[in-house]
């Protein structure tokens, strides 16, 4: 074997990746990934892009798309000029860029616990020391982290949503300690119950360091691999250089497609229909969960996003449960993949990909196997 | 300013990026970038992709596209199963992945001198010590490098093409010292004069460590941001995990588009027309160069690719020449951006983007300013 980089030692096979692959088996009922429902693609316009999009383009992205994103950010409470908006090749790329920007081996990164597993993977890969924090109490331990990674709106995996007070306090705690606030916000538009959603970065005082990122994967289409970031003035130019060294720029044909989508007359109505369908799926899933796991497990009905986080009885081994369910063609994500520190058993269940009938069937299997495992 | 990673100290503003931006001014005659001619896009099919491409897909890429790439690799002398082919978000991403795979701070990377500037940027960013080598004599100094980065076919910037003997010897020298051979091959199809082109990786013995990458930017369209890599068995799975952590997978709509292109009946004929037009542009450029710089500079007519490398008289300051030319709306890339060690002055000139008339005009300006600078 040749000499490879030290950081490879932390490069675990990606749980997400393995599960997406398993989920592609035709008969599997998968609650594992975060796949949008196929019906959400039905109304999207796929007309041919203009030929000039075939040439190289600017690293920051197409100017009209950056302007459309900046207008949208202003409307949700985050004022940022289009000059500080950059189009990404999916928001996973934003995590890679933020890690490159901040993390040297041993650098402390604050994360929620549980936390989005593909972010943990990247932070570990760059050598970060992960430090969990409590949302309500964002005081740092002896040593303030260099970066705080947060998904305050319909968190993955828990589905939770921070209050305005928590948002404001957190932005202040970061700014007061020169912590780079990194807010990942892919689920904001998938909202089923009213709740505070102003970006935490919108509360950041002047001079604070922040990166806010969003995705077009959840409301438009993941196959495009497009997201975006906005950042404070002291970080933006560095992030552009990092993006340039990573892949020059994002796919221009897809950028054009997203711009068409954002400007389409029927966009709001379509989004309402998609969100309405997801709300129904969530409610049906909630009912199925009560039927099959009601007296065995506990959960909060998520006010938005694509996931239920289900706490299991303390004596349950998540992986043993998964192994049993997999044998019956049912897939979910064990909680340990999202954890920074060991915690009580739990599982993450996606409710957007399987039909209500299949979900009912799959949850029945999980309930049966959970009972069998405990007896 | 918050705490940022040590590697940022080496993150220079990208010369490529700044130049691509300047080149977008409408009146500039740019010899700086590596932009394909607009006419090369004329015949490409832009019909709508199938709707299922909107969903998430596998990290390695679409299976039929990987198979098509593997068939193509076999036809040029590199046997690699489709299972070890991965689709990239442009070949710049392959450079990022290879750097992540191998480079810790202080690790030695062997490169040609001059070398593709955006690769140097990434290797420096990850902390590599760059060690130039002579193609004919690939014996390593006291310490063998961990990685050797080579563009043996129509090198960027020199346009050079290695002989079969050089290819075979280099593959052996890497394998004999556990050096990861990283071959970047974006220009292979833009061939104007016959020359050896079998991939160096095709000469790698069993058990050697190698990464071969190609691009769809030069013969199809850069706006798609799609390339691919193939790798030895000991590296492939690690590269897939690195790709997954970087952006999950490449744009599926564009992967579908490239597959249509690769299977289109008229592909070979179109490529012949594009290459024929580039050959004419190269020859016209060569004639213009002789007219305006014939007694001042020297160069080899490149047998393929998109660039002339022009050696200037020893007393010429590349940047002073650029500053004068820029004032007259003419842009090129000073040689120092490609150099690992200081060397005699030179410039890189792209001949594919400007029309023959504009190229003639621009080279006349360079000749005049070169004379003015020396008098």
Image: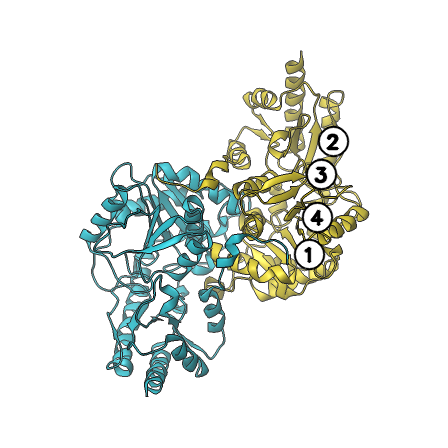
Chain colours: A cyan, B yellow
Up/down of B286 relative to B34, above or below? above
**Coordinates of residue A225 in the picture (x, y in percent):** 46, 56
Residue at 59% from the left image edge and 23% from the top image edge? B319
Asked whether the viewer can see residue B250, the reply is: no
> Which residue is painted at 39% across and 61% down in the image?
A117
Question: Outermost residue toward the top?
Answer: B375
Q: Same chain for labels 2 and 3? Say yes or no.
A: yes
Q: Marks 2 and 4, how far apart in space?
A: 20 Å
Chain letter of disc 3? B
Is A353 displayed left or right of A301 in the figure?
Answer: right
Q: Secondary structure at mark 1?
A: loop
Q: Residues within 10 Å of mark 2 (few under 14, many from 20)?
A: some
**CA–CA distance in space, label 1 to label 2:** 30 Å
Q: Chain of mark 2?
A: B
Q: Which residue is mark 1?
A: B266
Of B263 and B130, nearer the camera is: B130
């Amino acid at each position: 074997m040749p000499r490879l980089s030290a950081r490879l030692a932390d490069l675990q096979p990606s749980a997400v990746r393995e599960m997406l692959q398993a989920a592609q088996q035709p008969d599997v009922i998968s609650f594992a990934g975060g796949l949008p429902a196929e019906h959400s693609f039905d109304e999207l316009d796929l007309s041919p892009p203009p030929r000039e999009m075939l040439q190289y383009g600017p690293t920051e992205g197409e100017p009209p798309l950056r302007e459309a994103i900046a207008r949208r950010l202003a409307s949700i409470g985050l004022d940022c000029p289009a000059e500080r908006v950059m189009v990404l090749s999916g928001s996973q790329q934003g995590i890679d860029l933020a890690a490159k920007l901040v993390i040297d081996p041993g650098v402390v990164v604050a994360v929620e616990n549980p936390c989005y597993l593909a972010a943990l993977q990247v932070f570990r890969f760059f050598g970060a020391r992960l430090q969990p924090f409590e949302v309500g109490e964002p005081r740092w331990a002896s040593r303030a982290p260099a970066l705080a990674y947060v998904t305050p709106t319909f968190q993955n995996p828990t589905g939770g949503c921070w209050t305005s007070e928590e948002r404001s306090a957190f932005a202040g705690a970061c700014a007061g300690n020169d912590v780079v606030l990194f807010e990942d916000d892919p689920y904001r538009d998938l909202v089923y119950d009213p709740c505070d959603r102003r970006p935490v970065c919108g509360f950041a005082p002047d001079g604070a360091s922040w990166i806010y990122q969003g995705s077009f994967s959840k409301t438009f289409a993941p196959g495009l691999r497009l997201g975006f970031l906005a950042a404070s003035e002291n970080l933006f130019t560095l992030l552009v250089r990092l993006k340039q060294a990573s892949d020059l720029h994002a796919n221009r044909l897809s950028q054009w497609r997203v711009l068409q989508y954002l400007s389409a007359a029927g966009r709001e109505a379509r989004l309402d229909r998609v969100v309405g369908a997801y709300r129904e799926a969530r409610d049906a899933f909630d009912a199925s969960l009560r039927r099959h796991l009601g007296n065995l497990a506990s959960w909060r009905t998520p006010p938005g996003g694509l996931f239920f986080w289900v706490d299991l009885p303390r004596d349950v081994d998540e992986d043993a449960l998964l192994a049993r369910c997999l044998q019956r063609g049912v897939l979910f994500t064990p909680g340990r993949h999202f954890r920074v520190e060991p915690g009580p058993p739990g599982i993450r269940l996606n409710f957007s990909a399987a039909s209500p009938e299949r979900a009912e069937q799959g949850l029945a299997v999980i309930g049966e196997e959970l009972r069998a495992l405990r007896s």
